[in-house]
Amino acid sequence: MTDLKAHSRVRGAAVVGATVVAAELVFLAVHEAAGVDLAVRSGGTVTHVGAAAVAAVSLLVALAAWGLLALLQRMSARGRRIWTIVATVIFVVSLLGPLGAETAGATLGLAALHLIVAAVVIPGLRWESAR
């Protein structure tokens, strides 16, 4: 593996790690500090979003985004641009999820979680891939 590839992997992994940390910090601010119960109703079931779910989902989203970026860059000279458009559309669509929250506070808290993940992943991986 060349130094450039190794550097790219380290930086990509750093973006993934930063995504999880940022999401957890927002979760702590919303849930613990502000006392908002991040509860979502789907059908007749209410799901309470906890720290473990936030960590797992933010990790999976960041890894999937990184993998898709790598794939698109191999397939097209415009892979980074295509990825940025796809990632932005996915983020916007993901904002429909918080609309199922039980309270206005939960809606805002969940939207903040979606926003922080997108705010770290999209510019972080886009910037990394430009190197």
Image: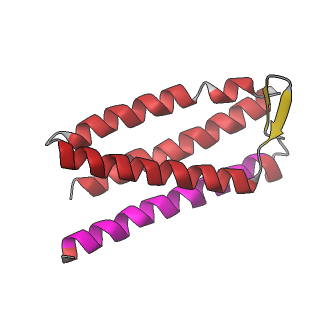
The image's colour scheme reads secondary structure
Whether the magenta-drawn stretch holds residue 122 is answered as no
Q: Residue 117's x, y, as percent?
A: 53, 46
Whether the magenta-drawn stretch holds residue 26 is answered as yes
Is residue 61 shown above or below 111?
below
Residue at 23%, 69% (x, y): give it.
5
| Image quadrant occupied by the N terminus | bottom left
* Labels in figure, total: 0
Q: Residue 107's x, y, as percent?
A: 72, 30
| Image quadrant occupied by the C terminus | bottom left
Residue at 55%, 31% (x, y): give it.
94
Frontmost residue, 1 versus 91: 1
Left/right placement of residue 90 relative to residue 124 reads right
Residue range (magenta): 4-30
The secondary structure that most of the magenta stretch takes on is helix
Left/right placement of residue 90 relative to residue 94 reads left
Residue 101 occupies which quadrant of the picture? top right
Q: Residue 99's x, y, as percent?
A: 69, 23
Residue at 64%, 56% (x, y): give it.
55
Residue at 19%, 44% (x, y): give it.
75
